[in-house]
Image: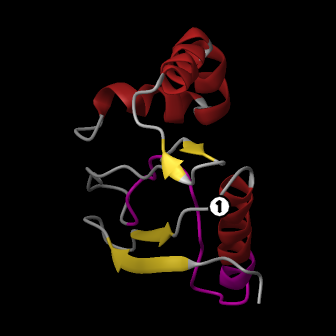
Amino acid sequence: KMGINCERLHSEVASGQYEITALPSYGIKGADDAMWIRNGLKEMSEKYEDWRATFVTHLPSLDGFSVIEDDSGAHFNYSLHDTKKGNNIGFAPTAKYFLGGVLHHIRGITAFCCPTPICYTTRFSSPWV
């Protein structure tokens, strides 16, 4: 109903951890879709007393003793397309400038992508980083 094309849902390594993959979208729609999925899951989980959807990077274990070794996170994949030709531009000069802009602003991007101390420190302790 919302026009979000979820490609797949599958379990991840840790208990209760899942990954949702959405099909590519153009422009800001991909980021909007990610937020709609996130907010929708949180709202749906509130209807069940024993469920909780959280997107916290690292949660303490349910029993208070064991360690959960696999952290959670989110990532986005970017593709640059030539809108006139309809193809991926690969390593064209535009792609190099895009990557240069990302690297130039990486500290600011990190502040938005890792807004909590737990999220930030997990970048250094996770085996997936």
Is residue 58 within the magenta segment? Answer: yes
Identified at 54% across, 41% down, the residue is 80
The location of residue 102, given as percent across then percent down, is: 56, 21
Is residue 76 within the magenta segment? Answer: no
Identified at 65% across, 61% down, the residue is 34
* Residue type of the residue flagged with mark 1: Ala
The location of residue 67, given as percent across then percent down, is: 27, 51
Q: How many marks?
A: 1
User: In the figure, 53 relative to 129: above or below?
Assistant: below
The location of residue 60, given as percent across then percent down, is: 42, 52
Q: Which residues are magenta?
A: 43-62
User: In the figure, 125 relative to 84: above or below?
Assistant: above
Identified at 30% across, 68% down, the residue is 12
Question: Would residue 14 be visible to someone looking at this image?
Answer: yes
Quadrant showing the N terminus: bottom right
- The colour style of the image is secondary structure
Identified at 46% across, 49% down, the residue is 73
Quadrant showing the C terminus: top left
The answer to whether residue 76 is left or right of residue 40 is left
Question: Counting other residues with Cα less than 10 Å from the Cα at mark 1, is it few (<14), some (14-19), or many (20 or more)?
Answer: some
* SS of the residue under disc 1: helix
Tell me the residue that label 1 is attached to.
34
Q: Nearer the viewer, residue 113 or 8?
A: 8
